[in-house]
Amino acid sequence: MRCRVHTLGLVGLLATAEFGCVLVDNPNYLALDGESETEGESSSSSETTSESTTSESTTSETTTSDTTETTMGSDCPPGKFGELDCPCVDGLTCDLGLTCVDGVCIEPTNCPAEDPNVVVAIDLLANGPSPATRSDFCDLEITVEGQGTLTNCNLGDLSDILFSLGPSASVDGLVGSSATSVTLSAVAAEELFLRIQSFNGFVLWLVVASSFVPADPELSNFPLSLAPAGSDCPYVPEFCGASQRRAVLVGDQAMFDGSSATVGGFPVWVDEARSVCGSDRYRVALLSQ
């Protein structure tokens, strides 16, 4: 039997010599350095871990609080949705006059008012078009009110095409009647690309579609590039979700729906540019004279 004796002193040594291994308490006993350090490190580590946990918790709470305040806005009443500086309802819609940007309701800064006088309308008579691209000559008459009538056409099942442009000031000079070359691309009544070229020198493009890319390249040779553009206009609740007014990039100029302008010398009408429940819709006319 082996006995480990911590510094027991003279009494311990005598006891060991006479009776074998006997442990006698020594009031002067001190723990070994290794044991003392271990206990100290354990206590210190516990305190450090506690402090670290508390610090991380505080940091996490601060970060969460800052993020919430940044997302909701500093002026948002607690629990409010759809109001100014508050979260959007369902992450999309806000109160009337506000728009949802990055999940927060703000006042729109790039959303001009619509002009109700801007009109681009096409009425296909007879039985309507079949999915095809066709060209033909028609008789054209444009009235001072900006309404055009194409008659005696032979575009599939179509015999007459009516279209209206407004305001009419830009088309007053087109009043009259002449034989006209017409190219029509139709994919159902909702996807129309119409190119009207008159013998007296003007070309009119009419687009009623979900994009500016027709199947036939001949119908996309616009004198100015046309492309979709976004906006910060307010979302409007719809039965299927929400709609939003958009813009059209005409050349390098953004035009919102319900607007008309002369861009690069070409009159342009944007009657509709809107996203409805995730589907884009455009109704645009462009004239070169």
Image: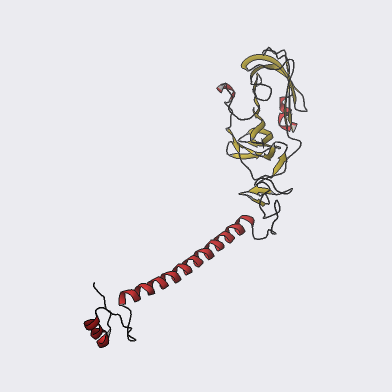
Query: From what the image shows, is residue 288 above or below residue 6?
Result: above
Q: What residue is at 74 percent from the left and 31 percent from the top?
A: 168
- Residue 59 picture location, percent across and down: 52, 64
* Furthest residue toward front: 19
Query: From what the image shows, is residue 199 above or below residue 225?
Result: above
Which sits in the foreground, 155 or 211?
Answer: 211
Q: Quadrant of residue 246?
A: top right
* Furthest residue toward bottom: 10
- Residue 127 picture location, percent across and down: 73, 15
- What is the number of callouts on the image? 0
Q: Tell me the quarter of the image containing the C terminus.
A: top right
Query: From what the image shows, is residue 55 above or below residue 198?
Result: below
Q: Quadrant of residue 17?
A: bottom left
Q: Tell me the quarter of the image containing the N terminus.
A: bottom left
Which sits in the foreground, 143 or 90?
Answer: 90
- Residue 217 picture location, percent across and down: 55, 23
Q: What residue is at 25 percent from the left and 87 percent from the top?
A: 10
Which sits in the foreground, 238 or 124?
Answer: 238
Query: From what the image shows, is residue 262 above or below residue 139?
Result: below
Q: What residue is at 69 percent from the left and 40 percent from the top?
A: 242
Which sits in the foreground, 58 or 203?
Answer: 58
Query: Which of the colour schemes (rainbow, by chain, secondary structure, one colour) is used?
Result: secondary structure
- Residue 66 picture location, percent across and down: 58, 60
